[in-house]
Image (cartoon, rainbow, N blue to C red):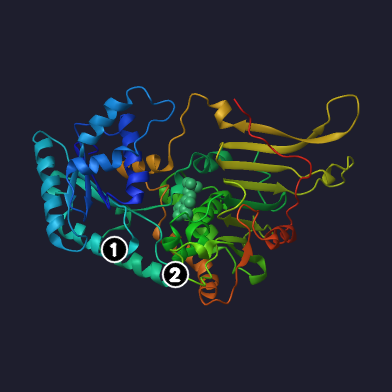
């Protein structure tokens, strides 16, 4: 039953991910009434010897109100922090976990003196190298008490390995201990409002049905840009690089949702079945359809090893061998230290045949889904220039969320995803076979980069990235609109 005691254990409680994402997400869920004081207990677990109060103080500063939640913030914060207990222990020996189990159980027995269940969620805000020992210890010492019913689930986040082999090894290690329905692999892009909207957009609108294919679409771009560099995360980043950090997971997940066929139903397995098919239809990436870059100054970061080849920018073309998409390039582009921060999907349609207005020269129809910031969907289209003259001009139909949904606070990705883990909904999580297929696509290229066989082109911080990337875009068929730019509406 979905009632009774719920214990949420955040392992790595004083780390960055926990402080910046996990606890704030839990707090927001609490504020919205999804975590009821009388049934939820939150445990922080880490190696540092600190008290409950010290942990609470460490995370307090990260729990800030949004513009709509200022009222009652302080009171909620105090109550929320009271739900958090700290348990100190190492990650690979039993003692700490036995203590943790004792704490959870004491609470469960107390709560369940009348009825209920033992629901245990373990959030591993830890480096993946310790996933196997941690999972082993959880399995050994901390599983839900079967006489009370309930469940045990674990939440993990990338990087899941560095290539196909290491990812499979990790999957095997975890898979020996937990069943797939117990494992929640987070890709936080799947928790973003406009990513979640993709399914609705595509399959609940007649508009798109006849257009969403190779007959009408010329090319699709999925773009991630950040206007800052590694910012002290160089040590982590350098081991992975932009392809493993952003493209292999976040952008590829978005690609799946853009390209997949309609699932049989909204059941998580039906959706994930379709995503896997997309991944399996990706053909090997060609060297000439990849441009890598590294921003100038990256090597000056003290946490980055001298002479590192790691790319901080990549543009590449993925091609799908299937009936809907044969011949349509999917251009994935991601970069750090660029001239802007945004993530968007840009679907560019083919030219109008037999064009009598010469409008093709001005620009093509484009449908843009802007994931962030300023969430929006807009359709760039040609209209008659208002006035007496018969001339055409580029304009747009615009659904900007900030304007259209002024009263709504768009939930953070982590908030939504954690709620899903509690509810047991795996739709927005990466299944094991999906992960494997994703690694199969990129591993050959990544190995060549690691061996230093594929060099990154230097680019200036705050630029568009290497000029070669724009050339690749053009070669792939993307036509830039000239003299027109969409500006998010201001309120
Ligand atoms: C993370 C990457 O997964 O996503 C970071 O490791 C990146 O390098 C971040 O900055 C971007 O997330 P968002 O939600 O800010 O687009």
Q: Quadrant of residue 26?
A: top left
At x 32%, y 36%, the residue is 27
Dot 1 corresponds to which residue?
130
Q: Is residue 278 visible?
A: yes
| Quadrant, the N terminus | top left
- The picture places residue 360, in percent across and down from the top left corner, at 83, 45
Name the residue located 70 percent from the left edge and 58 percent from the top edge: 470
Q: Nearer the viewer, residue 99 or 114?
A: 99
Give the number of the disc on residue 164: 2
The quarter of the picture where the C terminus appears is: top right
Whether residue 283 sits left or right of residue 270 in the image: it is right
Question: Residue 283, relative to residue 45: is it above or below?
Answer: below
One can see residue 319 in this view: no
Q: Quadrant of residue 69?
A: top left
| Badge 1 density bin: few <14, some 14–19, many ≥20, Cα 10 Å | few
Residue 198, horizontal then vertical, whole percent: 54, 43
Label 2: which secondary element: helix
Q: Residue at x 19, y 31 (%)?
A: 38
Contact (CB < 8 A) between labels 1 and 2?
A: no
In the rendered structure, the answer to whether residue 297 lies left or right of residue 132 reads right
Inter-mark Cα distance, 1 to 2 = 19 Å
- Which comes sooner in the sequence, label 1 or label 2? 1
Q: Position of residue 160 (x, y in %)?
A: 39, 62
Q: Quarter-wise, where is residue 424 in the image?
A: top left
């Amino acid at each position: 039953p979905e009632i009774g005691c719920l214990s949420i254990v955040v392992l790595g409680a004083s780390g960055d991910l926990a402080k910046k994402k996990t606890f704030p997400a839990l707090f927001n869920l609490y504020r919205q009434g999804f975590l009821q004081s009388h049934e939820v207990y939150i445990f922080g677990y880490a190696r540092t010897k600190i008290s409950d109060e010290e942990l609470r103080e460490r995370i307090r500063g990260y729990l800030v109100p949004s513009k709509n939640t200022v009222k009652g913030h302080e009171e909620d914060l105090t109550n929320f922090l009271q739900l958090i207990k700290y348990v100190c222990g190492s990650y690979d020996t039993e003692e700490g976990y036995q203590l943790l189990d004792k704490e959870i159980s004491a609470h469960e027995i107390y709560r369940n003196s009348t009825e209920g269940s033992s629901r245990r969620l373990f959030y591993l805000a830890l480096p993946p190298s310790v996933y196997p020992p941690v999972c082993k210890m959880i399995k050994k010492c901390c599983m839900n008490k079967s006489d009370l019913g309930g469940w045990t689930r674990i939440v993990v986040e990338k990087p899941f390995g560095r290539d196909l082999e290491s990812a499979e090894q990790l999957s095997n290690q975890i898979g020996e201990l937990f069943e797939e329905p117990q494992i929640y692999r987070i890709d936080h892009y799947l928790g973003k409002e406009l990513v979640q909207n993709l399914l609705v957009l595509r399959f609940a609108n007649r508009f798109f049905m006849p257009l969403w294919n190779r007959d009408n679409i010329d090319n699709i771009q999925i773009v991630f840009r950040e206007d800052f560099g590694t910012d002290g995360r160089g040590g982590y980043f350098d081991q992975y690089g932009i392809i493993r950090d952003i493209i292999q997971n976040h952008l590829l997940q978005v690609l799946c949702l853009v390209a997949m066929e309609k699932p049989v139903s909204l059941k998580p397995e039906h959706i994930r079945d379709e995503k896997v098919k997309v991944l399996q239809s990706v053909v090997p990436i060609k060297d000439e359809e990849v441009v890598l870059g590294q921003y100038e100054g990256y090597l000056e970061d003290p946490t980055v090893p001298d002479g590192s080849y790691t790319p901080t920018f990549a543009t590449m073309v993925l091609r799908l061998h299937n009936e809907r998409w044969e011949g349509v390039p999917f251009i994935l582009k991601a970069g750090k230290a660029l001239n802007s921060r945004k993530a968007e999907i840009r679907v560019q349609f083919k030219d109008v045949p037999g064009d009598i207005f010469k409008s093709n020269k001005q620009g093509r129809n484009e449908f843009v889904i802007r994931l962030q910031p300023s969430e929006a969907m807009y359709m760039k289209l040609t209209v008659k220039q208002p006035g007496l003259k018969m001339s055409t001009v580029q304009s747009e139909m615009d659904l900007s969320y900030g304007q259209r949904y002024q009263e709504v606070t768009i939930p953070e990705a982590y908030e939504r995803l954690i709620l899903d883990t509690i509810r047991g909904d795996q739709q927005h999580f990466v299944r094991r076979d999906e992960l494997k297929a994703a690694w199969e696509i990129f591993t050959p290229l990544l190995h060549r980069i690691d061996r230093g066989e594929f060099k990154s082109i230097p680019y200036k911080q705050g630029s568009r990235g290497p000029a070669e990337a724009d050339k690749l875009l053009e070669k792939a068929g993307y036509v830039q609109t000239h003299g027109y730019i969409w500006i998010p509406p201001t309120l």
